[in-house]
Image: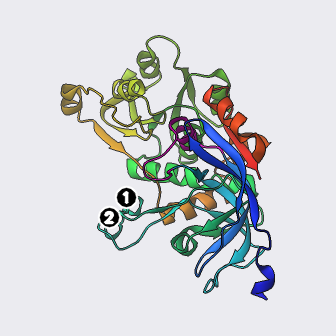
Amino acid sequence: MRELMKVTREKMTAAVLYGKRDVRIEQIPVPRVEAGEVLVRIKAALTCGTDLKVYRQGFHARMIVPPAVFGHELAGVVEEVGEGVESFAPGMRVVAANSGPCNKCFFCERHLANLCENLQFINGAYAEFIKIPESIVRQNLLILPDSVGFHEAALVEPLACVLRAVEKTGIEEGDTVVVIGMGPIGLMFVQILKSLGVRVVALGNRSSQLTVAKIMGADHVVDSTHSNVVEQVRKVTSGRRGADVVIEAVGLKETWQQALGMVRRGGTINLFGGCPSGTHIPLDSTLIHYSEITIKANFHHTPRHIREALDAIHRGRIKAQSLITGEERLAALGGVLERLLNRNGDLKIAIIP
C-alpha cells in the first residue's frame, strides 16, 4: 500500500537562492525519503524577517549555504512516509518546525534545546515539497487540529520563539511592557502579552502597524519617528519611571540603546531582535549597575514551545489571519521579497506553491 502512496513525479517547482538578492524559480528533483523521514506537500509558506536577511545577504552561516532552496515557515499535507514512521500517514495535515535538537549535548541536557550544539535545521519551504528529517519528524512535526488552517499553522515557528521569550523574561500580570517594533513578531508579542493581563506600550514607525497594534489590544501606541521617543514612552508609565520590561523586536543598534532609556530601575530588557553580525553597542555601565537593570536575550525555540504555539493558535490567543496581509504564487517570490525589503507595510505574505 505504501508503494502506491509514493510520489511518482521526478521534478518539482522550487525557489533556489544563489546569492545576494538572487532567487530563481526552477525545476529540481523531488526529495526522496529515507527511513524515519516524511515528505510534505507544502500548502502554505510564510515570508519571515530571517528569510529577508538571508535573501539580502545571500546566505545564513548556520542555516543555509547557496545554492539551496530556502524558506522555513510551512504547513502542508503528508505525501509520503519513510520506513519506520508510524505516527504519520499520507493525507495528514501537519506543521513542521524548522529544526530538531539532538537531546544529548551539553545544552540539551540543561534544558536549553534551542542552543543545541547539533541543532539540525531545514530550509526549503518555498517549494512544492519538503523532506522532513527524522529528528524533526520525531520531535517537531505536529498534526493540525481541523479548525486550524494552513496559513495560520505556518505561524507556529515564530510564535514559539515569542512564547519562549515571554516565559524566560519573567513577565507578570499587571506589568507594563514596552514592545519596540511592530512587525509580525512585535504584534505577536502584543497579543500574547495582552492575554496575560499585561499593560502594553507598542512602539513602531508605521501608522498602519500601530493601528493594528491598537486593534490587537495595545494600551498605548508611540510613533518612533517622533523626536525624544524615550520621553514619550516614559510619559505613559507610572510616575514616568519607565517600563517594568522592554522587549526589543527590531534588531538595530539604535533601538537596543533606546531600550535602556525606557526601562525602570530594577526592570528587565529582552534583546529579542538580532543585530547584524559584528555589531558592537556601547552601554552605560553606571546606569545598568546602579539601577539593577537585567539584560536578557532569546534565540530560537524548543519542542515544548512549538506545541504551545500550535495550542495558542488553536485556542485563539493569536489572531493569526491578522498577521498575514497577502497571498502570492511561488513564481512571484522574488518580487515579494523585493517589496518587503522596501518596507511597504506588509506583514507576512503566504506563498502558495
Location of residue 102 (image quadrant) = bottom left
Magenta segment: does it hold 51? yes
Percent position of residue 254, x then y: 40, 23
Percent position of residue 285, x then y: 19, 28
Q: Earlier in the sequence, mark 1 or mark 2?
A: 2
Percent position of residue 292, x then y: 23, 36
Q: Is residue 129 visible?
A: yes
Location of residue 81 (image quadrant) = bottom right
Q: Which residue is mark 1?
A: 115
Percent position of residue 59, x then y: 50, 44
For mark 1, give the secondary structure. Answer: helix
Asked whether 67 or 93 is in front, the reply is 67
Asked whether 217 or 29 is in front, the reply is 29
Task: Identify the residue at image location x=66%, y=68%.
Answer: 31
For mark 2, give the secondary structure. Answer: loop
Segment tinted magenta in the rendering:
47-65
Residue lying farthest to the top in this orientation = 227
Q: Amino acid at mark 1?
A: Leu
Q: Amino acid at mark 2?
A: Phe
Residue lying farthest to the bottom in this orientation = 1
Q: Which residue is mark 2?
A: 107
272 versus 290 height, above or below: below
Could you tell me if the residues under marks 1 and 2 are in contact, i.e. CB atoms within 8 Å?
yes
